[in-house]
Image (cartoon, helix red, strand yellow):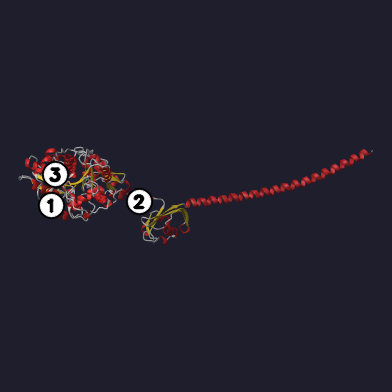
Amino acid sequence: MAIIDFKATKCRHCYKCVRYCEVKAIMVKDGRAEIMPDNCILCGRCLQICPQSAKTLVSDLSIVKHMIAAGERVILSIAPSYMGLLKYHTIGQVRAALLQLGFEDVRETAEGAALVTVEYTKLLEEGTMENIITTCCPSASDLIEKYYPQLVPYLAPVVSPMIAHGMMIKQQLGTDVKVVFLGPCIAKKKEAQDVRHSGYIDAVLNFNDINRWLTEEDIAIEDCEDQPFKRMDPKVNRLYPVTNGVVNSVLATEKKVDSYRKFYVHGETNCIDLCESMVRGEISGCFIEMNMCSGGCIKGPTVSDRSISRFKVKLDMEETIEREPVAEEETAPVLEAVSLRKVFMDRSPKDPVPTEEEIQHILAMTGKNKPEDELNCGACGYPTCREKAIAVYQKKAELNMCIPFMYEKSQSFANLVMETSPNVVLIVDENMKIMEYSAVGEKYFGKTRAEALQMYLYEFIDPVDFQWVFDTHQNIHGKKVTYPEFKLDTLQNIVYIERENVVLATFIDITKEEEQARLDYEKKLDTIDLAQKVIHKQMMVAQEIAGLLGETTAETKTTLTTLCKTLLEDGSENGGK
């Protein structure tokens, strides 16, 4: 099931998410980013920094509403970060407001944290682990399982407070009850689906979801009555979402002093630095509270209100929350009924590894033939050109993500066009100042490129068509323009480029074609004139022939008529005798 929704139409050649993703769990394909689920640790950083909001969190809100509408028994487990993220006068008002949404009960996830704290103290008392890394943050656990599997033995074999609370609720109320977790974390959604402990959390909401739902129902938390939480008072375990909260909970709960040094680390970069240090064997005998979010859960990836100060929240929570442990008689029965044990494992991605020759070949494809060609500018999202080449081999990145290379390539192509094109290329601004002028222009207009770039268009040709294109933003295609003073005939295309507010023109030299066309036309005229003369002569001959034929015919007619008359006269005379 998808956790982060990706809108491909909004993502184009940005690479910001790649730059900010500490584990490079983002693949770029056709210029667009795609999250690789097997590599992703769901820290949520890409959600926070995406300038186009191309990545959004898939919400379970409709699922939860459907559960309640269907008459299901639904219990809400609310993370202790609510104390710094919701506005209220008493915590009982928070419970009252959420009950109005239809939940059977609202309970604090810190109840589960109390159980986890007890398990941590047991590990500290046993003292058998070289180092103990807390497992409350699923992103931190994912970081180790996927990218530092050699540190898996240091992960405390204990489920997170969310899972522990789900186990606790279903043990107390029955497996048919639905448990919904409410918190600021997106990694909890994936953790809830983990086959190692699936079925204990049925849906995950964040505070944006719940605030939207309360607004839809016209419920204001500060106006609600005070309905205190009825179950276990988590006490010090409410400190889990702030830095050093887990350590403080453990210190308040453990019965005897242990030998481990305790410290906390938060933020992706710091967590990775610590893991690197541990891999080198520099850390030993430590209990480490690890959280991927800078400032702890209180600044989780779904916390959209940037006015919330993690420093103020930390100070307020540490001031108001009592440093008292939960009584053993409250936690012991639950721990006897459920097992909070979790087995961690090596889940590292099995990406293909290129040979040195293959890496060098990919580097050469982007013009990096020598070490000094490798700028390592990070514009593509990878810290070094070499790492980017490896990503290309693994099909996580594309060659054209190298911005300096593509810029140089585009510049070289542009220069190649301007230098070798047989056509005149002109670019002018709205004042008719020449911004670009191809080298071939000197052949036709007698101006070198250097001279032309200091001139205005009207200084050597009529700019009327250019001005018309500027004024109307309509393009001119295939217009014949003659420059008698330059003995030049051209076919012109003049277009407006809105983004740069300039006009681009190409002049195709058709002087020879036009001259040939004129010669062909003159030949046609000569042929027509010759034909007319022949026709006239033929008419004259025809008329002469006709005249001669007419005279001969008349003479013949006269002669034959005379002959006939003579014959008739001779016949009359003979008949009379």
Quadrant for the C terminus, please: top right
Q: Residue at x 79, y 46 (%)?
A: 554
Q: Where residue 535 sits in the image (x, y, percent)?
A: 65, 48
User: Which mark is in front, 1 or 2?
Assistant: 1
Q: Where residue 507 sits in the image (x, y, percent)?
A: 43, 53
Q: Secondary structure at mark 2?
A: helix
- Crowding at mark 1 (Cα within 10 Å: few <14, some 14-19, many 20+): some
Q: Secondary structure at mark 3?
A: loop
Q: Residue at x 14, y 49 (%)?
A: 238
Q: Secondary structure at mark 1?
A: loop
Badge 2 is on which residue? Answer: 414
Given the image, on which type of amino acid does mark 2 rest? Ala
Q: Which mark is residue 321?
A: 1
Given the image, on which type of amino acid does mark 3 rest? Thr
Q: How many marks?
A: 3
Q: Quadrant of residue 462?
A: bottom left
Q: Where residue 4 sits in the image (x, y, percent)?
A: 26, 45
| Label pair 3/2, CB-CB below 8 angstroms | no
Q: Nearer the viewer, residue 215 or 11?
A: 215
Mark found first going from the N terminus, 3 or 1: 3
Does the image show residue 375? no
Mark found first going from the N terminus, 1 or 2: 1
Q: CA distance from mark 3 to mark 2?
A: 57 Å
| Label pair 3/1, CB-CB below 8 angstroms | no
Q: Nearer the viewer, residue 469 or 523?
A: 469
Q: Looking at this rendering, what residue extends furthest in the left direction?
A: 256
Badge 3 is on which residue? Answer: 134
